[in-house]
Image (cartoon, rainbow, N blue to C red):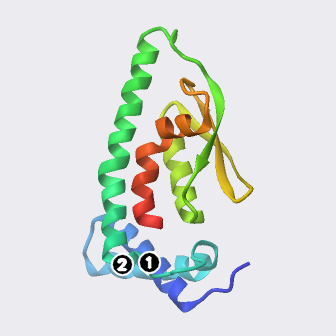
Amino acid sequence: MQKTTLPAVVSTFVVSFAFWVLLTWSFTPQELIAGAVISLAVALFSARFFIHEKAFWLCNPAKFFSGLFYWVCIFPVELVKANVDMAKRCFGGCKNINPGIVKVPVDLKSDYGQAALANSITLTPGTITMETTEEDGQNYFYIHWIDVTAPSGREAGDAIKGTLEKGLRRVWE
């Protein structure tokens, strides 16, 4: 288990408090004080589980705006495209599906980047990240895909994670 450090607590507090403000969207003193107290408690108890290195990476404007661009522009577009594809398959009688499990190489080195990519893949309809492995220094995802159109890992990876991984690389690498 990681030791809790002050930078980890501060960065967890900032993220928790920002999330609180976004959820409540209230700027009254009582709400802000309650949010600060709860965010501090969350930060004190959970910082060692979430922040292991580079606690203030989000303070880098390039990383911050790249992350914001990913979560506001890139991911929603990919999500809508996957939903439209699934709707076509469902309303078309589910005849044109070819489900299978594909081993896809992942070029992200950061644990946080890999977790964000695995979650992004799983949140898009038609794909589920089942497992992550490392073999000979290369990271792989095992992904259940509703329509396996590419037999090789690289081709399948480009179809499944292409834009998502490129967007996350600017944030986590």
- Give percent across and percent down for residue 121: 51, 43
- Viewer can see residue 23: no
- Give percent across and percent down for residue 38: 48, 77
Structural distance between the alpha carbons of marks 1 and 2: 6 Å
Q: Which residue is situated farthest in the left direction here?
A: 27
The reply to whether the C-beta atoms of the residues labelled 1 and 2 are less than 8 Å apart is yes
Residue closer to the observer: 155 or 133: 155
Residue at the (44%, 57%) spot, across then down:
168
Residue 13's disc is none
Q: Which residue is mark 1?
A: 57
> Which amino acid, by three-letter code, is at mark 1?
Trp
Count the numbered circles shown: 2
Q: Secondary structure at mark 1?
A: helix
- Give percent across and percent down for residue 165: 46, 51
- Quadrant of image for the N terminus: bottom right
> Which amino acid, by three-letter code, is at mark 2?
Asn
- Viewer can see residue 167: yes
- Res 87 quadrant in image: top left
Look at the picture and state if 57 lies above or below 88: below
The 10 Å Cα crowd at callout 2, few under 14, some 14 to 19, many 20 or more, is: few
Residue at the (40%, 30%) spot, across then down:
83
Please indicate whether residue 59 sits to the left or right of residue 154 in the image.
left
Q: Which residue is mark 2?
A: 60
Q: Which residue is situated farthest in the bottom direction here?
A: 6
The 10 Å Cα crowd at callout 1, few under 14, some 14 to 19, many 20 or more, is: some
Please indicate whether residue 133 sits to the left or right of residue 58 in the image.
right
- Give percent across and percent down for residue 26: 27, 69
Residue at the (49%, 82%) spot, across then down:
40
Residue at the (51%, 56%) spot, across then down:
116
Residue closer to the observer: 108 or 7: 108
Q: Secondary structure at mark 2?
A: loop
- Res 107 quadrant in image: bottom right
